[in-house]
């Protein structure tokens, strides 16, 4: 679970998060949805860039990683958001929201059927009668983990304090559980140390996810295959359900 992954919980690793998970098409899409929402709940808010930027009337960011939330509180606009250190599987708030989002493939940290059911139940419990939810998960048919090798994944990023950082991954896929263990390596040019952390994520086929959403009392109004609005297909990169409460 993300709550135990040093990639998110250790400040030494959390500082690298926004280098690859900053504002992107997912945030742009959710920001557009939020224009019509008076309240937004972000489950797995990470360093909080989305909520701190869009600043709806009522914004709650939830993440189990304290190191991430410290960065969220410190960023510009962070004082307008309520940040909660909590596990999305067990969250119980006495309110409902117009929009609930999980971006940056946060849904994939739920590694078992029970974990996913609990997370979806949280969405169901906190969604307003006319509210909407949206989240993304990678399409297992694309086998993204095959590109997470040191040779294929090597890239160089710019850190605001450390300068150039060389980054690469290793990955191990378990066909029985559909869980990928990812080892992330960060090597700043200004430091001889290589920062290494392991995280685990699950790849869920769209039919299984659809059944789980229905069982949770959530109705999907559309399935997208990317954040540009392309309709989902078996060969698309993403699986993105957008929906409301069933019934």
Image: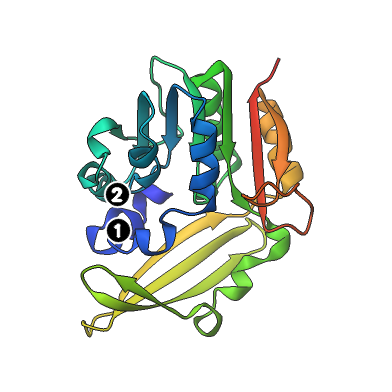
| Mark 1: secondary structure | helix
At 21% from the left and 82% from the top, the residue drawn is: 191
**141 vs 21, nearest the viewer:** 21
Q: Is 37 on the left or on the right of 11, as rendered? A: right
Q: Nearer the viewer, residue 135 or 6?
A: 135
Looking at the rendered structure, which numbered label has been put on residue 68? 2
* Residue 178, quarter of the rendered image: bottom right
Q: Is residue 70 above or below residue 245?
A: below
Q: Residue at x 60, y 74 (%)?
A: 147
Q: Which disc, if any, is residue 230?
A: none
- Residue 56 position, x and y percent, is 39, 28
The answer to whether residue 56 is left or right of residue 130 is left
- Above or below, 217 against 120 in this view is above
Per the image, the residue denoted by label 1 is 14
Image location (x, y in percent) of residue 208: 72, 42
- The residue most toward the right is 234
Whether residues under marks 1 and 2 lie with C-beta atoms below 8 angstroms apart, the answer is yes
The C terminus: image quadrant: top right
Q: Nearer the viewer, residue 194 or 156?
A: 156
Tell which of 40 and 95 is nearer to you: 40
- Residue occupying the point 40% across, 56% down: 22
Is residue 117 visible from the viewing direction of this image? no
Circle 2 sits in a helix, a strand or a loop, which is it? helix
Q: Earlier in the sequence, mark 1 or mark 2?
A: 1
């Amino acid at each position: 679970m993300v709550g135990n992954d040093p990639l998110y919980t250790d400040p030494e690793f959390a500082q690298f998060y926004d280098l690859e998970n900053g504002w992107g098409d997912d945030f742009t899409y959710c920001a557009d949805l939020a224009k019509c929402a008076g309240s937004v709940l972000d489950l797995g808010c990470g360093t909080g860039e989305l909520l701190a930027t869009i600043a709806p009337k009522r914004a709650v960011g939830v993440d189990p990683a304290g190191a991430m939330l410290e960065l969220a509180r410190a960023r510009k606009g962070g004082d307008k958001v309520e940040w909660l250190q909590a596990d999305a599987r067990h969250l119980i708030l006495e309110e409902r929201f117009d929009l609930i989002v999980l971006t940056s493939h946060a849904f994939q940290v739920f590694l078992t059927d029970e974990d996913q059911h609990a997370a979806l139940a949280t969405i169901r419990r906190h969604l307003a009668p006319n509210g909407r939810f949206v989240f993304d998960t990678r399409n297992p048919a694309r086998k993204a983990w095959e590109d997470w090798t040191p040779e294929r994944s090597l890239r160089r990023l710019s850190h605001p304090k450390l300068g150039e950082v060389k980054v690469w991954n290793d990955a191990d896929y378990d066909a029985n559980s559909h869980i990928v263990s990812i080892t992330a390596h960060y090597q700043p040019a200004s430091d001889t140390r290589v920062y290494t952390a392991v995280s685990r994520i699950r790849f869920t086929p769209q039919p299984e996810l659809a059944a789980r959403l229905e069982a949770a009392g959530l109705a999907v109004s559309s399935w997208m295959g990317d954040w540009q609005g392309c309709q989902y297909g078996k060969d698309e990169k993403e699986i993105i359900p957008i929906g409301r409460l069933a019934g």
